[in-house]
Amino acid sequence: MILLVVDVQKGIACDELYAYDTFMDRTARLIDAARKNHVEVIFFQHDAGPGSGLSAGDSDFEIAPQVAPERGEKVFVKTINSCFGNKDFAGYMERQEDKRLMIIGLQTNWCIDCTVKSAFERGYQVIIPEGTNSTFDNDYMTGETTYRYYNEEIWPDCFADCVTFDEALAMISK
């Protein structure tokens, strides 16, 4: 199994996210468990382009310190929503024997959804732990409704195995 930590960057990892405290706590706990159990952790940063405030060199582009990568952990930059849009990452994954991806991070309805579906289309077993992705309110839905829509309606039994947080910890600890 590989743990993908998507876009938990200073500029968007804030208390305006749905269930922010739970999200950050569970994300940090899964990363810690993965490290202790020799599960590879791969980080992503979304680069929205110069002048966006979320681009290489901007403070908000940096990964949130609560979940920052350790020395030697891979960090990929992407410019589209799916992590597989980074050709180096896609090539790296093609060489891996283990086809299980646990995907956590931001934002549920953008980069997480695109990465989940891209991984599924490539034949990976996708695992989504409860409370480890989040998003903001938008003009159409609250962050909670958006979270629930994807985690309870769109992904289960089709694109991903949506599991409890404790089940995810047990999977990483095997």
Image (cartoon, rainbow, N blue to C red):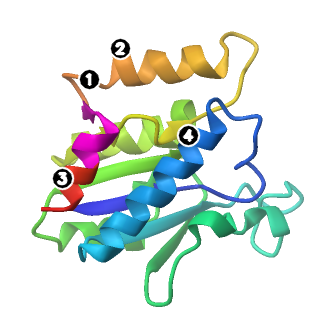
Q: Residue at x 10, y 69 (%)?
A: 97
Residue 92, position in %: x, y? 29, 74
* Drawn side of residue 69 relative to residue 174, left or right: right
Position of the N terminus by quadrant: bottom left
User: Do the residues under discs 1 and 2 have CB atoms within 8 angstroms?
Assistant: yes
**Closer to the camera, 169 or 4?**
169
Mark 1 or 4, closer to the camera: 4
Residue 4 drawn in magenta: no
Q: Amino acid at mark 4?
A: Thr
Residue 171: mark in rendering: 3
* Drawn side of residue 67 relative to residue 48, left or right: left
Q: Residue at x 19, y 22 (%)?
A: 157
Residue assigned mark 4: 22
Mark closer to the chain start, 4 or 2: 4
Number of numbered labels in the structure image: 4
User: Do the residues under discs 1 and 4 have CB atoms within 8 angstroms?
Assistant: no
Residue 10, position in %: x, y? 75, 59
* Mark 3 neighbour density, 10 Å: few (under 14) some (14–19) many (20 or more): some
Q: Which residues are magenta?
A: 161-168
At numbered mark 2, what does the secondary structure look like: helix, strand or loop? helix
Q: Amino acid at mark 1?
A: Pro
Residue assigned mark 2: 153
Q: Work out how far the residue at label 3 is from the one at label 4, CA to CA, in angstroms.
A: 20 Å
Q: Work out how far the residue at label 2 is from the one at label 3, CA to CA, in angstroms.
A: 23 Å
Position of the C terminus by quadrant: bottom left
Mark closer to the chain start, 2 or 3: 2
Residue assigned mark 1: 156
Q: Is residue 118 above or below residue 43?
A: above
Q: Residue at x 17, y 71 (%)?
A: 96
Q: Work out how far the residue at label 1 is from the one at label 2, CA to CA, in angstroms.
A: 6 Å
